[in-house]
Amino acid sequence: MQLPAFFLPVLYRSIFITTLFMMCSNVLRAQRDSSLHTQDSTRKHPEAVWLALSGETAHILSDGTPEGERLLDSSRYSAINLRVGWQVPSPDVYAQLYRHPMYGLGFYYSRYRNENFGHPLGLYGWFDIPFTRHTTGRWRFSYYGAFGLSFNFNPFDEKTNPNNKYIGSKRNVYVSLMANATYFITPRLAVIGGVGFRHFSNSARVLPNYGINMIPVQLALAYKINKVQIDKRLDTIPRFKPRWLTNVWIAGGHKEYEIGGDAFLKMTFTAEELYQFSYKFRAGIGFNAFYASGAQKRDSSNASGFSKAMSYGITANGEWVLRPNLYVPLAIGYYLKHHELNDETQSTYVRVGVRAKVWKNWFAGITVKAHGGTSDVFEWTAGHTFGKDRNNYKRLMIF
């Protein structure tokens, strides 16, 4: 099924607006629940709020081709980031579990000396989690992750920008992982240095999509805008009550199979059975059914249209829980049936992303499905979780 040009942008905007509305509803509910779950009001346990401004440069990794090497030789990357972050105090359970990390939102603006890439900017959510509960003097060492959307790339175009064979779309997903070292000049002023890995990709939504991979080095100045001190002596974590849960979800995305070709719909239908054995981790198994539209155009065999379009797989699943309503799904899958003409090029696949509970037991999110190091599709996901949770999550923060 070939999609009208206007359909997918309208669909994605509708999903985004609906998700944003549901998240706002969840914010209000979370604030109400936090007052019910804690004897003290949140006013007695305010968050420490930080602002950080950083500059960075990066080494961009080549795709290994001579054309790619020449493009990178003429390109230099630099960027600025403005971030706001919240450090949550006790008695919030997940703040204690992760050693009082920071969660926040960020904005970045970047420049490439070569106009083939453009001047991307973007928005992202981030977390910064200490490696240890106890800091040594003025130093704090942590791992950092960010996930968001980037805009304003100058994408590949056969006529106007034929040299940028790394990325084919103006809008891309932004993923960043870093190791940070923080030095506190005063209790409210800190310098942060970090190094890590960053990836920009549209997961074959528009070709070409080698993606832009880089190793960034960042230096930031952070300031705490209020006088809140996090008192770790109040940490008390209730014993976790293990539970079984079932996830049922549907996901949709679209991709090109050739540069300049039509966009085709890909869908995933999934059922998963998981066992949550701690506050932080769940594990289990799942079943995937995949639908790839336009399969009859790619496959001239005598098989039925349904058979050409459908694939099936089983997965080993894990979920890393960052907050009661925010988690990172991970999966390694094995195809029971797959089609190379639908870009299912290996017998195995992987999935990683981010999901949030947006209303009661309903969740939404985005994941990347890939074969080895090659992205297959972005999965815009919505689903429902079945199973009673007997744990009482004391929380002072949304999600």
Image (cartoon, rainbow, N blue to C red):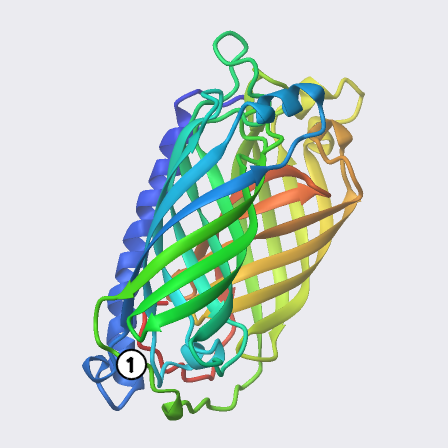
Q: Secondary structure at mark 1?
A: loop
Place of residue 295 in the rendered image (x, y in percent of width and height, measured from the top left)? 67, 25
Q: Quadrant of residue 231?
A: bottom left
The residue under label 1 is 229
Camera-side residue: 71 or 371?
Answer: 71
- Left or right position of 145 against 24: right
Camera-side residue: 370 or 153?
Answer: 153
Q: Quadrant of residue 256?
A: top right
Residue at 53%, 41% in the rendered image = 58
- Left or right position of 330 against 128: right
Residue at 25%, 72% in the rendered image = 31
Camera-side residue: 364 or 304?
Answer: 364
Would residue 152 be seen by someone viewing this image from the given angle?
A: no
Would residue 201 be seen by someone viewing this image from the given angle?
A: yes
Quarter containing the C terminus: bottom left
Quarter containing the N terminus: top right
Place of residue 286 in the rendered image (x, y in percent of width and height, measured from the top left)? 67, 59
Place of residue 78 in the rendered image (x, y in percent of width and height, measured from the top left)? 44, 37
Within 10 Å of disc 1 (Cα), the crowding (few <14, some 14-19, many 20+) is some
351 to 101, vertically: above or below: above
- Left or right position of 201 against 152: right
105 to 260, vertically: above or below: below
Camera-side residue: 11 or 80?
Answer: 80
- Residue that protrudes farthest toward the front in the picture: 185
Amino acid beneath label 1: Gln
Place of residue 38 in the rendered image (x, y in percent of width and height, measured from the top left)? 29, 87
Number of marks: 1
35 to 102, vertically: above or below: below
123 to 13, vertically: above or below: below
Residue at 65%, 41% in the rendered image = 290
